[in-house]
Amino acid sequence: MIDSINYHNLPLLNKSSMKLLFKLLIIISLATCSQSYAQVDIGKNESQAVILTLDDGSVIYGIITERTDFEVTVQSASLGSVVIPIASVTNTKYIDDVRNYIYDNDGNPVDFHNSTHYFLFPSGYGLKKGQSYYENIGVFFNTVSYGVSDNFSISAGAEVISLLFGIGTPGMYISPKLTIPFGNQKGAFGINATAIVLPSNNFDGFSFLSGSATFGSRNNNITIGTGAGFNFEGGITDEVIPFTVGFMKRLGPKLSFISENWVFAYDDFTEAEGIISAGLRVHFKNVGGAFNFGLFRPIADIGPFIGLPFISATVPLGL
């Protein structure tokens, strides 16, 4: 039988010991709260569009449908309803809409921004309303594109070589694009009208009208395109008629193969020259960003010359 404890015989804690014990209790309480809630700041409001990064490196896009003190339920377009422990979430980002964060049948993120073009030539696809991106080409050329609506976007850009070397007014361009989708991501038809100002002090330039028919999804497609130069004084010129064929194939979540090939017909189609290209697109973790590199090679006997290198990078400015 256990003897009853005589509390009167226990030594009393002095005032300094009581203060120390109180401080220890506060520290333990704060540490416990930190372990439970400090990993991520997830709002308590439901129906929020969110991007969650987990401790294993995976990223979940979806709508918050339920939240407790220990877990959050996200409705994902590709994964369905997912219950995620809050302790496994390392970062959270709230957005206005997650409809742009979708995956193809192979589980690869759909790149809305870079599906609008290959290296240089546009595909039939366009930006969705509110989407935008900045692209740098070969360090010296800069462009910005913005989706005015789901079917109309506009791009504008300029080079900086003229400014660096004091040549004069830099070369600039502006290019509106009308997109007509085929439906169900089966392809799209695009029309571009591009006005180009050459680097000089006379604001000389020319314009170019092109059409692109793209067959396939945004991640995997082929595009056939053509165009013609024109100006308001002389009308459309058929001195040189370009034709292009582009390919885009998603190889995985972070990599795509791209190819852009040109044939230039002139002298009433009695003569022609061509350029072929091939390269890779490395997709960044932030959807819409990518680094592109490839080689352009003329279809001619150019000896040991392999090809002209091409590099560019895109950074999304909006969803």
Image: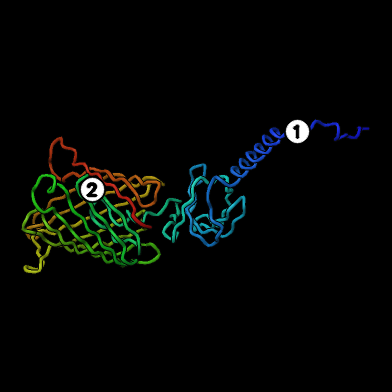
Say above or below: 305 vs 172: above
In terms of sequence position, does the residue under pointer 1 or pointer 2 come before the other? 1
State the mark number for residue 13. Answer: 1
- Please, is residue 252 above or below residue 223 in the view? above
In this rendering, would 13 be left or right of 277? right
Residue at x 20% of width, y 45% of height: 296
Seen in the image, is 136 located left or right of residue 56? left
Amino acid type, label 2: Ile
| 193 relative to 85 in the view: left or right | left
- Seen at 53% across and 62% down, the residue is 47
Q: Which label belongs to residue 192? A: none
Query: Which label is found at residue 137?
Result: 2
Residue 307 in picture, x, y percent from top left: 19, 40
Q: Quadrant of the C terminus?
A: bottom left
Answer with the quarter of the image where residue 65 lies.
bottom right
x, y (%) of residue 63? 51, 59
Most distant residue in the right direction: 1
For the residues marked 1 and 2, what is the alpha-carbon distance in whole angstroms? 74 Å
